[in-house]
């Protein structure tokens, strides 16, 4: 076991002024790792990933980082190297997503991290560590959306499912899972040049971001049996207005805004269900179930097609890219 390791650390140049924060790779030792009450497990990290929230943290948007210095990275996969927990032993292969790691607690942009065992799940045997972060928080969230559709009774023969922000991380994963499960998938993208990529993941028809950003009428023609919405705002309102009777709309994102300019009409006249999806505080049982489904219902070739691996040294320049909607699919971060 090495005694020092590399981590990306965000520090404020001027204490108390988040605007002065800057990120740099530093060499740390175990003694530098914070302990949060019962942080009882140390993990040697294989991979982290880049999610929208990481982009916000890296660019200082939305006050994602709640204390400085901070090691960002809201997820990671790796191997337990020390443990005082009954649930995890040295050598266990684990995944962490959410729980405000990379926001309030030090996260995955590091070769090593110390965390609470309550935050970890065991990596399913069908997934490699790289695949686990190819999925990451975005893919887990996509699967939670799919499970939300299933829970609402949406079946593959009921009609098309619309996925918004389709070329992004959550969107790409949702498209691939839904198509694999036999659903007909319509992808909404602002990047027409990504249609071939999305067709390869299983989307069969397309709508532009502009078309789906037009202000909706309270009710429009019944089109969708279900939806995975990563965009929010007017696009989510449009999706709700176009959802069929008893359809289910899962809402997980805010890439287009945090507002929701809708009416009650889809709910009271069409029995539409709006299902919120939160991966950050999802209970362990829900995570285990979602990861088990990810190991079987996301084809490995599709996951590979949507994943790019970058060294940790490149992550600072990736932050603005994801905020500008320029990242396709998933970016895995290799700290080693
Ligand atoms: P990405 O940036 O990879 O994907 C977002 C996609 O949304 C973009 O690729 C783009 O797709 C589209 N988009 C970007 N900006 C706009 C805009 N202004 N208007 C309309 N569409 C836009 O991010 P992630 O996939 O990592 O995350 C997607 C969303 O889900 C984020 O809002 C994130 O915060 C949220 N999220 C929520 C989680 C939860 O637990 N609830 C967990 C993980 C993510 P295209 O080019 O195809 O149009």
Image: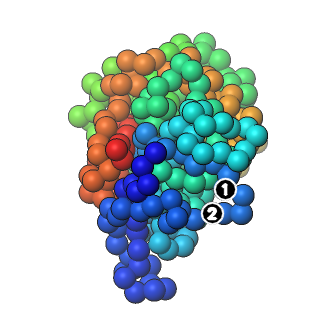
Q: Where residue 293 sits: x, y (%)?
A: 61, 22
Q: Quadrant of residue 155?
A: top right
Q: Name the residue at the left extreme.
A: 193
Above or below, comparing residue 306 to residue 69 in the picture:
above
Q: Is residue 105 visible?
A: yes
Q: Position of residue 315 (x, y in %)?
A: 31, 53
Q: Along the line of sight, which residue is nearer the eye, 329 or 65?
A: 65
Name the disc covering residue 80, or none.
Answer: none
Which corner quadrant holds the C terminus? top left
Q: Residues within 10 Å of mark 2 (few under 14, many from 20)?
A: some
Picture layout, residue 180 above or below residue 115: above
The residue lying at 35 percent from left, 32 percent from top is 307
Q: How is the image coloured?
A: rainbow
Compare residues 118 and 218 and report the one nearer the observer: 118
- The reply to whether discs 2 and 1 touch (Cβ–Cβ < 8 Å) is yes
- State the SS at label 2: loop
Residue 67 to residue 51: above or below: below
Q: Horizontally, is 194 left or right of 69 in the view?
A: left
The residue under label 2 is 35
Which residue corresponds to the image point at 41% horizontal and 79% vertical from the top-left?
Answer: 12
Gap in angstroms between the C-alphas marked 2 and 1: 5 Å
Horizontal side of 291 relative to 307 (left or right) equals right
Q: Residue at x 39, y 54 (%)?
A: 5
Whether disc 1's CB lies below 8 Å from ligand 1 is answered: no
Find disc 1 in the rendering and name its residue: 39
Residue drawn at x 26%, y 52% is: 314
The spot of residue 111 in percent (x, y) is 42, 49
Q: Give the crowd class for mark 1: few <14, some 14-19, many >=20 residues within 10 Å.
A: some
Query: Dot 1: what SS?
Result: loop
Q: Please state which of residues 186 and 329 is positioned toward the viewer in this rendering.
A: 329
Mark 2, ligand 1, within 8 Å: the answer is no
Residue 329 position in % (x across, y down): 37, 36
């Amino acid at each position: 076991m090495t005694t020092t390791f590399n981590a990306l650390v965000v520090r404020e140049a001027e204490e108390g002024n988040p605007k002065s924060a800057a990120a740099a790779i530093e060499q740390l030792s175990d003694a530098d790792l914070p302990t949060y009450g019962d942080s009882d497990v140390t993990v040697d990290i294989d991979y982290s990933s880049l999610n929208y929230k990481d982009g916000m943290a890296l660019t200082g948007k939305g006050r994602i980082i709640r204390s400085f210095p901070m090691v960002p990275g809201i997820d990671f996969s790796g191997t337990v190297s020390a443990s005082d927990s009954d649930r995890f032993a040295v050598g266990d292969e684990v995944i962490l997503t959410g729980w405000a790691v990379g926001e309030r607690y030090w996260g995955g942009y590091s070769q090593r991290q110390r965390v609470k065992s309550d935050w970890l799940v065991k990596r399913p045997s069908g997934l490699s560590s790289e695949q686990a972060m190819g999925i990451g928080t975005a893919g887990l969230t996509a699967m939670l959306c799919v499970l939300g559709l299933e829970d609402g009774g949406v079946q593959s023969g009921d009609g098309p499912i619309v996925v918004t922000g389709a070329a992004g991380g959550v969107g790409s994963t949702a498209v691939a899972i839904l198509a694999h499960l036999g659903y007909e998938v319509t992808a909404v993208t602002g990047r027409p040049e990504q249609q071939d990529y999305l067709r390869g993941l299983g989307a069969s028809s397309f709508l532009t971001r502009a078309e789906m950003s037009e202000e909706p009428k309270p009710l429009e023609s019944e089109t969708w049996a279900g939806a995975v919405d990563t965009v929010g705002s007017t696009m989510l309102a449009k999706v709700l207005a176009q959802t069929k009777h008893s359809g289910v709309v899962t809402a997980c994102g805010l890439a287009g805004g945090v507002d929701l300019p809708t009416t009650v009409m889809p709910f009271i006249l069409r029995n539409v269900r709006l299902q919120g999806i939160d991966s950050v505080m999802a209970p362990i049982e829900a995570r285990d179930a979602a990861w088990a489904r990810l190991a079987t219902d996301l084809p490995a070739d599709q996951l590979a097609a949507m994943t790019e691996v970058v060294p940790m040294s490149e992550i600072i320049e990736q932050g603005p890219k994801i905020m500008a909607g320029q990242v396709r699919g998933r970016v895995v971060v290799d700290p080693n």
